[in-house]
């Protein structure tokens, strides 16, 4: 299982995550912040749980590229 978490409120809209993992992240046209696709919002933490381990590499690149460190990627 892969768990990706995004603290969307702290997003500065740099777009690096979308460039690294476009299948998981998208920029919102409403506020210019990133959206973690197919995630569940719990008090500002958007979480995606996926059995697809093929998304890990790109999501880890997005995690490392994020200048405000609001993306977390874990494999369990």
Image (spheres, rainbow, N blue to C red):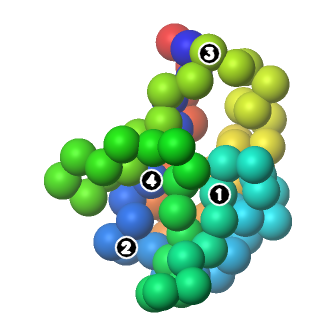
Write the residue at 57% across / 50% down: 37
Between the C-alphas of marks 3 and 1, the distance is: 17 Å
* Earlier-in-chain disc, 2 versus 3: 2
Image mark for residue 25: 1
Residue found 23% across the figure and 46% down from its top = 42
Camera-near label (1 vs 4) is: 1
Q: Nearer the viewer, residue 48 or 5?
A: 48
In the rendered view, tell whether residue 55 sits above or below residue 62.
above
**Residue at numbered disc 4:** 6
- Where does the image place residue 13, in percent across and percent down from the top left? 57, 82
> Does 5 appear above or below 22?
above
**Marks 3,1: beta carbons within 8 A:** no
Between discs 1 and 4, the one toward the N terminus? 4
Q: Secondary structure at mark 4?
A: strand
Q: Is residue 5 visible?
A: no
Name the residue nearer the viewer: 49 or 57. Answer: 49
Q: Which residue sits at x=30%, y=49%?
A: 41
In this figure, which residue is indicated by the disc labeled 3?
51
* CB-based contact (under 8 Å), mark 1 and mark 4: yes
Q: Position of residue 44 (x, y in %)?
A: 26, 58
Instruction: Please say if the residues under marks 2 and 1 sit with CB atoms less than 8 Å apart.
Output: no
Asked if residue 32 lies left or right of residue 64, the reply is left
Q: Is residue 5 above or below residue 21?
A: above
Circle 4 packing at 10 Å, graded few (<14), some (14-19), many (20+), is many
């Amino acid at each position: 299982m892969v768990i990706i978490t995004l603290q969307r409120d702290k997003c500065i809209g740099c777009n690096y995550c979308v460039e690294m993992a476009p299948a998981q992240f998208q920029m919102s046209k409403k506020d210019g912040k990133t959206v973690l696709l197919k995630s569940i919002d719990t008090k500002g933490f958007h979480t995606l749980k996926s059995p697809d381990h093929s998304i890990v590499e790109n999501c880890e690149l997005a995690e490392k590229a994020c200048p405000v460190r609001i993306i977390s990627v874990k494999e369990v």
